[in-house]
Image (tube, rainbow, N blue to C red):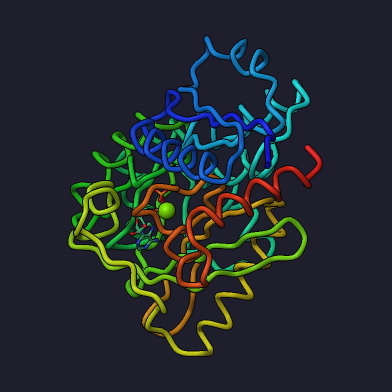
Amino acid sequence: MNRKKILVLMGGMSEEREVSLRSGKAVLDALLTLDYEAQAIDFNSSTIKDIIDYQPDLVFIALHGKYGEDGTVQGLLESLQIPYTGSGVAASAICIDKVLSKRIFSSEGIPNAAFRIIQSHDLDDPAALRQQLIANIGLPMVVKAATQGSSIGTYIIKDENEILTAINQAFKYSREVLAEKFIDGQELTVALIGNNELQVLPLIEITSANDFYDYESKYTQGMCDHIIPARIGEESQADIISISKKVYKLMGCKGFARIDFMLAKNGQPYVLEVNTVPGMTAMSLVPDAARAAGINFTNLIEIIVNLGLESNY
Ligand SMILES: Nc1ncnc2c1ncn2[C@@H]1O[C@H](COP(=O)(O)OP(=O)(O)O)[C@@H](O)[C@H]1O
Ligand SMILES: [Mg+2]
């Protein structure tokens, strides 16, 4: 009988609260099936005492986005000396920030789409900014908030008259905004599990009913397809696996993570971003990839728990 006490943190205050509640419930069910003593709480600022009072052996972080996936909760748990699942403070804080991540990718030779970082003062001369973006990035371009997830604050821009509106919209979600070259090709995602020894799960190709993999396609049944194995050649596959491992180590990820890619039509892969607390709902990508590797959802949760317990917080 395994009676370790595990507290699931879910919900929280981010834009991805609803997704997190679904992830948390699925995780809790699996933990109870595994016979852990487990409980889930909706995490907000008033529940720090609840965490302490529960005296968990481990906290399972099922929070997505700000105040959960970004290192803040990880820092809180470190201060309380409570082990937790997934990546630590630094890796979480870097991966949630697409601007910081891209600075690291670029300095370490990780292929990523050409970009320009936009700060609020760049809007002092909007016409100049728009001209620079058209000249340096070109259309179509992707405008995205630096620290959002679930495609919230992400816009694919085909018409130059929409650039500034999108930038202003994206600034509602974060202090910095990215303008990125649109990569025309296949969308892929790679799930990895491990602390030091890494297991790369089967690559997933994502197709979406909408223009891109937006919030609606991510969370509406039937609006996207997860194709496993991804319909790509062996060379691309080997390339993407090798980049994924390099990125996971480079960012200092622990436990598990999911790395998003675009594979351009000429065979060049580009890393989009690293998700340190990827969705864990029944229709999420990581559980799907695990299933294709013969790891069912409950097994996957057990693996993540054990990696959390063995990793130094
Ligand atoms: N440079 C790009 N080229 C083509 N599509 C992109 C690009 N960047 C983002 N996208 C699309 O937008 C989606 C969300 O972007 P992503 O960077 O993964 O942020 P998040 O998933 O955190 O919202 C991707 O899944 C993809 O469909
Ligand atoms: Mg993504």
Give the quadrant of the C terminus: top right
223 shown above or below 85: below
Locate residue 121, reporting x and y percent.
45, 31
Question: For the view shown, which residue lies furthest in the bottom direction?
Answer: 234
Whether residue 302 sits left or right of residue 166 in the image: it is right
The N terminus appears in which quarter of the rendering? top right
Task: Let me know if residue 91 appears in the view.
Answer: yes
Image height of 38 relative to 103, above or below: above
Q: Residue furthest front?
A: 1
Residue drawn at x 36%, y 51% is 282
What residue is at 39 percent from the left and 54 percent from the top? Answer: 284
164 up-or-down from 272: above or below: above
Q: Position of residue 165 (x, y in %)?
A: 24, 39
Q: Position of residue 197 (x, y in %)?
A: 75, 65
Q: x%, y% of residue 160?
A: 22, 53
Going 48% across and 49% down the picture, which residue do you hit?
278
In terms of depth relative to the viewer, which is nearer, 166 or 212?
Answer: 212
Taking depth in this image into account, of 269 and 241 the one nearest to the observer is 241
Residue 124 visible in the shown view: no
List the single residue furthest toward the right.
312
The answer to which of 75 and 141 lies nearer the viewer is 75
